[in-house]
């Protein structure tokens, strides 16, 4: 079985600051949800159900650092679609469709959303474009019937939903699926020997342009500091008179 | 009148020349078996990486004297220690005695007579008795006490049986010889045991019968000697050879120091740490064979005590079995959880009579797990944050001085002529509870008029957790950065409230060119009290006890200053826990365990809290932010613990400053 894992390079959420229109950080990392997707692909391979894991990302040469991190985690090889533009989910999904058609994976596993724009659309649009079944917000994956079907647990607001779908399929990962492994410096050095294939949109045969434009990015207003109340009575008074919630 | 000068004994008196030849061939064959067995083990050791041995012969001599001859690590008030002393002394004296006799008999000068001979006989008899008593006690211990950590194999009974029979037949031979050679009583008395047997049991037997019996007993003894040599390489008895080898050969290094890895080497080999058995060095492989399975390491291990899947003894035995079966992959025999369970408290290393370095073995295998990406979850997060934020708490390093708000703490920038650099450490910088320790320390230093400064946001994690968890290169990155900062700020003296920072700065940074005079805050505070720059108004009468941090007490031997700071000597209410001082018991946070998730039933801190509670103490003082954190949790999770205050020694001392200076 071959697994394709699309991943995105995002500003380090531990270290992000807002400057002008977009979040920036001194350092970029693999989108944490995509990291979970990579980890899951590795675990599927480790239990003997997959033979190859291919990573794919879109960006300028600077994202090679995150590609190395993915390769160091254990991804076999990676593709970078060389495009430095700020693309929207539809454009990304169209590029990924071209990559899926080129690589012909049995399953695509990717994060449910990226932590920089929180769009949560690429997986769904990609499934739509390919006409594949999808399981989103997944917290467990199990392959059935000689790996022709997958049973996934989805985390929904109403509770856990178990779905079965035919492969090939798109699976998007939620937080509780796994805890990604730690990559050390020697791991990164060893990953230098693994191949990164750089392709342009032209080479994979798509021509995209963003359909949406970001107009402004603003910080949420600072929350005022809380106050400590002395007694239950005071709390009730405050809830009634100031917060007006009871 | 006994003629002392002519007193001697016959050697091989009753043994025909052809029998002597048979005897020598038999002994030679059994020694050949012994040598062959040892050489075949040594063949396995040399499959390891080259080197690893101590090279300084003076260290060998000193260690052999202390740990092999004087058996320093064996002494304890236990039956096992007593019987080992008896067996060991008997074994050594009898071996030396027999060798001397052989030298006298075969050498050019026969010195085996006169007073020398008589004292020789007496000494041999006394130690022969010691040897037999040792064997019997060992059998009693194996039959009735059955300490689980000792382990019980059939070969143990075989070995003890051989040793006991050797002792008994030895005395039988002596008694029969005294009888048939008709030694005068005045001389025979010196062979006290043989003489007593002769007087009480053999008097009725005629000389010819005694001579025949002597021949039979002699052959019995001789065959047992041959069996004994061939038995030495069997199981745990091999330690009589490998134990001294490891004692001499183990490299000399401060206990709290791990060996650096070299990046070029890693790039060449593609390996970090130990994945295959042959990735250990030769000394480490030898050390596996030096284990006699006494179980002292296991008895001291906090992981074993809390039901985690780690026993330091089992690690050694499992690796040895892997070596014997010519196996390769260490992770097939030792599970990842076993390696992660270690707190690196060094209690096993401190206990081991033959100086096995369990923590080094575990650390080397952890390094491989890290290299292979086998770590995930909270400890992985801590390492990522050391890499990205320079501290394991994941806070922005810009907030490093948040703990100092309102205290006007001098920084290296504002006070470049400082005498002491206060290395606050990540815990005291970011952990809300430990921040109070940093504040208390600063208040005390200010009260005492110490000229100090902090690095502020220039301070970063020492890398200790990274190194212990197994990410050597993350550690080295931190070490290089910090050494660079400390050099730039012209730092000579460092004081820190964290024993882990203390150990790393003091013992590990010299590996990267950082040489400083490093003190734990306990020693500086004790000095300041001693010279009267800080007061200590004494306790408020509450019973108090002290939890010694492993990396302060066991690893760096510092146990007096902490006691001086809490005024232990003149406080009638001061209590000591059973495991205290250098023989302290871990809180559970070491070895990076601070960042691992732990089942409540497996918390070391709960065990330790129970021990502290049993002293009746109402205050538990400690001197480490991690111990403070763990013991606070431990007390909260222990019946009766909610009434115990867990404080750092600096907080205790601050509360005892006279009001005016507080």
Image (cartoon, coloured by chain):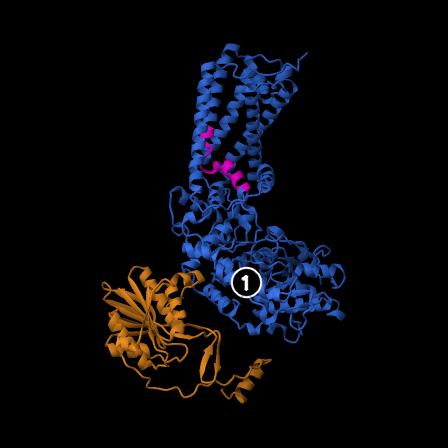
Chain colours: A orange, B blue
How far across and how far down the image is residue B480, in percent? Answer: 54, 62
Chain to which the residue tagged by mark 1 belongs: B
Tell me which residue sits at (52%, 19%) in the image. B173
Tell me which residue sits at (55%, 72%) in the image. B397
A55 shown above or below B559 = below
How far across and how far down the image is residue B629, in percent? Answer: 57, 64
Q: Secondary structure at mark 1?
A: helix
Closer-to-camera residue (B575/A192): A192
Q: Residues within 10 Å of mark 1 (few under 14, many from 20)?
A: some
Type of secondary structure dominating the magenta stretch: helix
How far across and how far down the image is residue A133, in percent? Answer: 25, 74
B320 shown above or below B479 = above
How far across and how far down the image is residue A213, in percent? Answer: 37, 87
Please say whether residue B578 is visible from this viewpoint: no
Please say whether residue B112 is visible from this viewpoint: yes
Q: Is residue A88 magenta?
A: no
Q: Is residue B446 left or right of residue B473?
A: right
Q: Which residues are magenta?
A: B227-248
Tell me which residue sits at (41%, 60%) in the image. B374
Find disc 1 in the rendering and name its residue.
Answer: B480
Q: Is residue B281 left or right of residue A54?
A: right
B114 shown above or below A116 = above
Q: Is residue B228 magenta?
A: yes
Image quarter of the C terminus of chain B: bottom right
Closer-to-camera residue (B269/B610): B269
């Amino acid at each position: 079985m071959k697994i394709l894992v699309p991943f995105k390079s995002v500003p380090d959420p531990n270290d992000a600051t807002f400057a002008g229109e977009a979040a920036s950080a001194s350092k970029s990392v693999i989108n944490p949800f995509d990291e979970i997707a990579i980890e899951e692909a590795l675990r599927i391979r480790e239990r003997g159900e997959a033979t190859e894991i291919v990573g794919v990302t879109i960006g300028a040469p600077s994202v090679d650092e995150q590609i190395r991190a993915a390769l160091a985690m254990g991804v076999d090889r990676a593709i970078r679609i060389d495009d430095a533009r700020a693309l929207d989910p539809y454009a990304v999904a169209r590029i990924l469709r071209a990559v899926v058609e080129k690589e012909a994976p049995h399953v695509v596993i990717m994060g449910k959303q990226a932590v920089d724009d929180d769009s949560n659309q690429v997986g769904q649009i990609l499934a739509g474009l390919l006409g594949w079944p999808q399981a989103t917000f997944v917290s467990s994956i199990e392959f059935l019937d000689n790996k022709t079907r997958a049973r996934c647990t989805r985390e929904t607001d109403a509770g856990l939903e178990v779905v079965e779908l035919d492969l090939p399929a798109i699976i998007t990962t939620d937080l509780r699926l796994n805890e990604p492994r730690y990559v050390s410096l020697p791991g990164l050095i060893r990953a230098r020997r693994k191949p990164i294939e750089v392709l342009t949109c032209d080479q994979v045969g798509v021509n995209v342009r963003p359909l949406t434009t970001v107009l402004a990015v603003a910080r949420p207003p600072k929350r005022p500091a809380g106050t400590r109340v002395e007694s239950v009575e005071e709390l009730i008074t405050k809830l009634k008179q100031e917060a007006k919630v009871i | 009148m006994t003629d002392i000068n002519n007193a001697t004994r016959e050697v091989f008196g009753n043994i025909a020349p052809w029998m002597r030849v048979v005897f020598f061939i038999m002994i030679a064959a059994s020694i050949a078996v012994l040598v062959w067995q040892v050489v075949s083990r040594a063949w396995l050791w040399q499959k390891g990486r080259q080197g690893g041995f101590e090279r300084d012969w003076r260290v060998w001599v000193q260690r052999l004297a202390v740990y092999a001859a004087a058996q320093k690590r064996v002494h304890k008030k236990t039956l096992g220690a007593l019987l080992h002393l008896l067996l060991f002394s008997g074994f050594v004296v009898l071996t030396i005695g027999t060798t001397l006799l052989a030298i006298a008999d075969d050498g050019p000068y026969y010195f085996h007579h006169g007073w020398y001979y008589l004292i020789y006989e007496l000494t041999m008899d006394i130690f022969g008795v010691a040897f037999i008593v040792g064997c019997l006690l060992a059998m009693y211990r194996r039959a009735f006490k059955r300490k689980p950590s000792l382990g019980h194999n059939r070969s143990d009974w075989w070995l003890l049986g051989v040793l006991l029979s050797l002792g008994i037949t030895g005395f039988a031979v002596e008694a029969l010889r005294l009888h048939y050679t008709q030694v005068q009583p005045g001389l025979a008395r010196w062979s006290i045991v043989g003489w007593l047997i002769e007087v009480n049991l053999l008097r009725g037997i005629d000389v010819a019968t005694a001579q025949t019996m002597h021949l039979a007993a002699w052959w019995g003894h001789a065959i047992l000697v041959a069996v004994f040599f061939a038995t030495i390489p069997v199981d745990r008895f091999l330690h009589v050879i490998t134990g001294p080898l490891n004692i001499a050969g183990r490299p000399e290094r401060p206990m709290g120091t791990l060996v650096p890895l070299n990046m070029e080497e890693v790039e060449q080999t593609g390996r970090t740490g130990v994945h295959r058995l042959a990735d250990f060095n030769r000394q480490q492989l030898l050390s596996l064979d030096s284990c006699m399975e006494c179980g002292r390491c296991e008895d001291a291990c906090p992981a074993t005590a809390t039901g985690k899947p780690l026993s330091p003894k089992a690690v050694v035995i499992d690796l040895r079995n892997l070596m014997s079966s010519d196996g390769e992959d260490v992770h097939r025999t030792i599970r990842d959880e076993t390696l992660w369970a270690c707190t690196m408290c060094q209690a096993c290393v401190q206990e081991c009579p033959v100086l096995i370095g369990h923590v080094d073995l575990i650390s080397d295998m952890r390094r491989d797990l890290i290299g292979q990406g086998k770590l995930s979850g909270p400890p992985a997060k801590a390492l990522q944050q050391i890499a990205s934020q320079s501290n394991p708490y994941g806070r922005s390093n810009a907030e490093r001085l948040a703990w100092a708000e309102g205290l006007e703490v001098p920084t290296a920038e504002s006070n470049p002529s400082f005498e002491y650099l206060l290395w606050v450490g990540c815990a005291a910088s970011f952990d809300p509870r430990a921040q109070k320790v940093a504040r208390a320390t600063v208040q005390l230093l200010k009260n005492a008029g110490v000229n100090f400064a902090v690095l502020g946001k220039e301070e970063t994690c020492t890398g200790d957790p990274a190194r212990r968890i197994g990410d050597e290169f993350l550690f080295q990155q931190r070490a290089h950065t910090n050494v660079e900062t400390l050099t730039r700020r012209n730092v000579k003296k460092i004081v820190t409230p964290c024993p882990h920072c203390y150990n790393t700065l003091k013992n590990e940074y010299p590996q990267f060119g950082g040489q400083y005079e490093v003190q734990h805050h306990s020693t500086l505070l004790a000095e300041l009290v001693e010279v009267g720059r800080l007061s200590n108004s004494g306790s408020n009468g509450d019973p108090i006890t002290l939890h010694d941090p492993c990396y302060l007490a066991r690893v760096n031997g510092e146990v007096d200053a902490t006691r001086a700071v809490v005024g232990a000597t003149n406080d009638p209410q001061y209590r000591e826990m059973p495991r205290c001082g250098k023989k302290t018991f871990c809180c559970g946070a070491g070895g990076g365990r601070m960042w691992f998730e732990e089942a409540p039933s497996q918390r070391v801190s709960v065990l330790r809290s129970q021990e502290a509670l049993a002293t009746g103490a109402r205050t538990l003082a400690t001197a480490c932010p991690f111990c403070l954190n763990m013991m606070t949790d431990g007390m909260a999770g222990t019946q009766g613990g909610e009434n115990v205050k867990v404080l750092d020694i600096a907080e205790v001392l601050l509360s005892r400053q006279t009001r005016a200076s507080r």
